[in-house]
Amino acid sequence: MPLQKPWRDLDRRTVASAPDRPGVYELGDGSGTVLAVDHGVLRDELKTVLAYGDGDRVRWTETHTLEQARELAAEHRTRLE
């Protein structure tokens, strides 16, 4: 099951609005197909993703801890396999 959040364009404005908290994010292409799922401190992670141009869209959900983010990301990755 994908994250139940709206897609956002992956650009500087979106990255600047990302929380400086742990979470899980999905990268998508222009049509909304999930390309990758990862976790970490969201703003830091998305700065890196934007620099490498790995996707066109992004959506995320916050978690309380990095451990929770890691577990949630693992659950979401299994559906991509």
Image: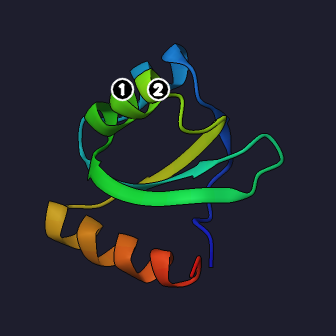
| Relative image position of residue 31 (x, y in whole percent) | 83, 47
| Relative image position of residue 42 (x, y in whole percent) | 32, 41
Under mark 2, the amino acid is: Leu
Observer-nearest residue: 6 or 39?
39
State left or right for residue 74 relative to residue 14: left
Query: Going 28% across and 65% down the picture, which residue do you hit?
Result: 69
In the rendered image, which residue does mark 2 sit on? 50
Query: Going 38% across and 70% down the picture, which residue do you hit?
Result: 73
Callout 2–callout 1 Cβ contact below 8 Å: yes
| Relative image position of residue 51 (x, y in whole percent) | 42, 22
Q: Secondary structure at mark 2?
A: helix
| Relative image position of residue 36 (x, y in whole percent) | 52, 58
Residue 65 appears anywhere in the view: no
Q: Which mark is residue 47?
A: 1
Under mark 1, the amino acid is: Lys
Q: Calculate the distance from the C-alpha at mark 2 to the C-alpha at mark 1.
A: 5 Å
